[in-house]
Image (spheres, coloured by chain):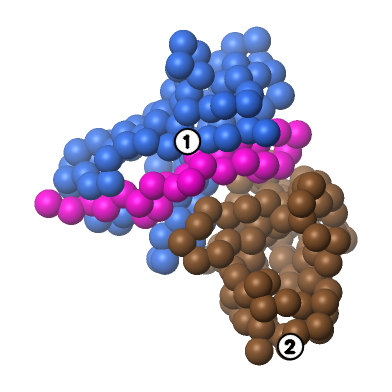
């Protein structure tokens, strides 16, 4: 049972907008910044969003992040087939004194 | 551009010690603004943070409660790298292990991952 909760799956058709939610608590998301990662099969997680809503250089602006209270969301607009991957949220937990991760959301592009 | 290059054996026998190293380029293990983490991923446990080391005028470590009695993370300033040792491994420790750099509260850079299988 993950400390941070994500839906196990999400799907959309090309061009559609999809959102993935991430629910935590006051000791993690409520107090610290949220990271979002994209993981393609057989590769390491790659940071997609940092500091709740910032994109590293090279990440398309189709990806956006937001946070409110103890929850966060990742939105992907203009969905493309190459967006099919696993997505994880993470935050530092001040009570556990460590990083906590969501269980991951498998995104399928129909 | 920070790059992390992992090395270490992919097969460890039960009850022995798992040892991995992460070589850093583009930053210093002694940086006052970064921390150096180990994370593992398995189908049963998902992504699990194991611990970190960092330097803020002196060296500090934090470890996950789940592995605290068995884990050690050490910096090596002479080689600009850091290492993971996990003692008394069981098949439950079979996972892909990643090193990662965190800075200003974000896990920015990851190593390529090492699949470690615990089996006799």
Q: Name the residue that disc number 2 marks.
A: A13
> Residue B46: within the magenta?
no
Give the colour in which the image draws chain B.
blue
Question: Which x, y percent locates residue B54?
Answer: 59, 23
In the displayed structure image, the side of residue B19 where residue A18 appears, left or right: right
Position of A23 relative to B49 (above/below): below
Q: Name the residue that disc number 1 marks.
A: B5
Mark 2 secondary-structure assignment: loop
Secondary structure mostly seen in magenta is strand
What chain letter is assigned to the residue under label 2?
Answer: A
Regarding residue A60, the answer to whether it shows in the image is: yes
Out of A27 and A59, give the one closest to the viewer: A59
Q: Which residues are magenta?
A: B95-120
> Residue B113: within the magenta?
yes
Position of B82 relative to B43 (above/below): above
Q: Which chain is brown?
A: A
Mark 1 secondary-structure assignment: strand
Out of B60 and B36, give the one closest to the viewer: B36
Question: Which x, y percent locates residue A14?
Answer: 75, 85
Regarding residue B51, the answer to whether it shows in the image is: no
Residue at point 53%, 35% (across, down):
B4
What chain letter is assigned to the residue under label 1?
Answer: B
Residue at point 65%, 19% (across, down):
B31
């Amino acid at each position: 049972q993950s400390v941070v909760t994500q839906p196990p799956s999400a799907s959309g058709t090309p061009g559609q907008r999809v959102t993935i939610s991430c629910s935590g608590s006051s000791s993690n998301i409520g107090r610290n910044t949220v990271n979002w990662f994209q993981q393609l099969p057989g590769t390491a997680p790659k940071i997609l969003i940092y500091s709740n809503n910032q994109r590293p250089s090279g990440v398309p602006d189709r990806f956006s992040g937001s946070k409110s209270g103890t929850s966060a969301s990742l939105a992907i607009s203009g969905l493309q087939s190459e967006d099919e991957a696993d997505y994880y949220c993470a935050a530092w937990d001040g009570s556990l004194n460590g990083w906590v991760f969501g269980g991951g959301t498998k995104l399928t592009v129909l | 551009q920070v790059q992390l290059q992992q090395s270490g054996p992919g097969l460890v026998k039960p009850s022995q010690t798992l040892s991995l190293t992460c070589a850093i380029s583009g930053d210093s293990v002694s940086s006052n603004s970064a921390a150096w983490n180990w994370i593992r991923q398995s189908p049963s446990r998902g992504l699990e943070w194991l611990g970190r080391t960092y330097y803020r005028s002196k060296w500090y470590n934090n470890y996950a409660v789940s592995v605290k009695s068995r884990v050690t993370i050490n910096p090596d300033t002479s080689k600009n790298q850091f290492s993971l040792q996990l003692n008394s491994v069981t098949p439950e420790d079979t996972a892909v292990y990643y090193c990662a750099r965190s800075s200003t509260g974000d896990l920015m850079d990851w190593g390529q991952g090492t699949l470690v299988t615990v089996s006799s």
